[in-house]
Amino acid sequence: MPRRKGRASLVSPSLDGAEAAPLFRQLYNELRGAILSGRLRPGERLPASRALAEELGISRNTALAAIEQLTSEGYLAARPGSGTYVADNLPDLGAPASRARQNGRGQVKARIPAPEIPPRGARLLDVAGYRPENPSGKYWPCFAPGLTDHSDFPFPLWARLLARAWRYPKAELVAGGDPGGYPPLRQAIADYLRQARGIDCAADDILIVSGIRQAIDLTCRLLLEPGDPVWIERPGFPGLGAAIAAGGGRLVHVAVDDEGLDLADGLKQAPRARLACVAPSHQYPLGVVMSLKRRLDLLAWAREARAWILEDDYDSEFRYAGRPLAALRSLDADGRVIYVGTLSKLLFPSLRIGYLVAPPSLAQAFRRARAIVDDQPAMGVQPALAQFFADGHLAAHVRRMRKRYAHRQALLLAAAAHHFGDRIRLEPDAAGLHLVGQNRLKGRSDAAISAELREAGLTVSPLSAYDVGPVQGNGPKRQGLMFGYAAVPEAMIEPGIAAIARVLKL
């Protein structure tokens, strides 16, 4: 039925029977939009339902359904013997400051108010100068650090383990309920740490987390008061400092020397620190191994100061020469070390599984804290991962990848020596997934070199980006170029280094 001109033109709806939305919903949206935009003002009378239906060429029941819905929601009010009106108690939505945006059909669009993020939230979004790395596939080859090769992960086997666990799941898998995580997985991790890292811990000491940052967040919530000083390594991974600052800790950037974290520098800056975060097995990004003396000194400090140590056992699995020193946690006789690790780097990034090993005296407190803030970890992959451990697949995969990464490091060293000479010098490292090249290009900062390479489609990270502490106090920002090699296929390493040399005119 064609639409006639008249009172209904105040609403100006255009209904389309071909649309997926029912006609009453279309009319409801149009009338609601007219009210919210101010085209229909508080106290204004609507046409009678019969007249509105005739104007729009729809049934009266359709018009009544839309009007009744708007009345039940408070947009309209019926006055017996008089008709239906826009509710009087609505604010003046026709004022310019409160007028909603509309699309071409007169439907209201959501208002987009100015952000009202309080200072604490703003600090979370811009804490410690942290910006997430984005080493995407647009750069070839990608020598970004921190990446691993998951192309050889046994995904068909993984799929079978998942299917086995969930085809006929046990009741405890479906119900969940343990804030610590799946007990067989926690036991498998305890057995693995005892054998691989010399850590004597019970399954009840272990908490399954989504990653290192959740472990840090729980630690900060449980053990820190807002503003408590926290020692972190300088340089170090900015994401770790960001997580600590977001959790309320005050970052104290402590220098790293050839023996690891410099305790003297930490004591000079913040003698009453409540937490020290260290990666003693293979410091990121320098690759320094903390000396035994420095480890014992750090443990003594924590004991005497009643402080805590968070040990990130970064890259301990990927060691290519000699045996690593025992984990700091294995030397802790006083229960001051919280040990954290990740399985995502060992297997594949989207796994998002890590673990926290609490001192026995704190294990129950960590479980309760986890239950409060996050209830329990997702059960999805935990049973398959427990079986992956139990059947020896994890150990076999780590051995295979360790051999592959050692070969790629050797290829990188050979290519760099050939194409860079002494202008960017790389030294071998007994562990890890990247090498730090000494920048000997006078007058060119590592950040400028990295930006120049990125313009050419090549990714090499500047070491200075990881030196986020204040320039004054413990020296200027370090200079260097970080070459990740673990995720670069063997055939691309030499051509990639040659391309870098060409861009930099070496």
Image: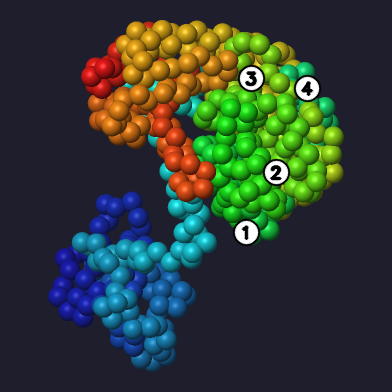
Please provide percent x and percent y for residue 460: 37, 26
Query: Which residue bears the numbered disc 4?
Result: 198
Label 4 vs 2, first from the N-terminus: 4
Q: CA distance from mark 4 to mark 2?
A: 28 Å
Q: Nearer the viewer, mark 4 or mark 2?
A: 4
Vertical comparison of 23 with 7: above or below: above
- Alpha-carbon span between mark 1 and mark 3: 34 Å
At label 4, which amino acid type do we have?
Gly
- Tell me the residue that label 3 is attached to: 317
Crowding at mark 3 (Cα within 10 Å: few <14, some 14-19, many 20+):
many
Q: Amino acid at mark 2?
A: Gln
- Please state the horizontal and vertical placement of residue 86, each as a whole percent of the image: 35, 82
Mark 4 to mark 3 CA distance (whole Å): 13 Å
**Pointer 2: what residue?**
376
Camera-nearest label, 1 or 4:
1
Residue holding disc 1:
227
| Badge 1 amino acid | Gly
User: Dividing the picture into quarters, in which one does residue 105 lie?
Assistant: bottom left
Label 1 and label 4: CA atoms lie apart by 34 Å
- Local crowd at mark 4 within 10 Å, few (<14), some, or many (≥20)? some
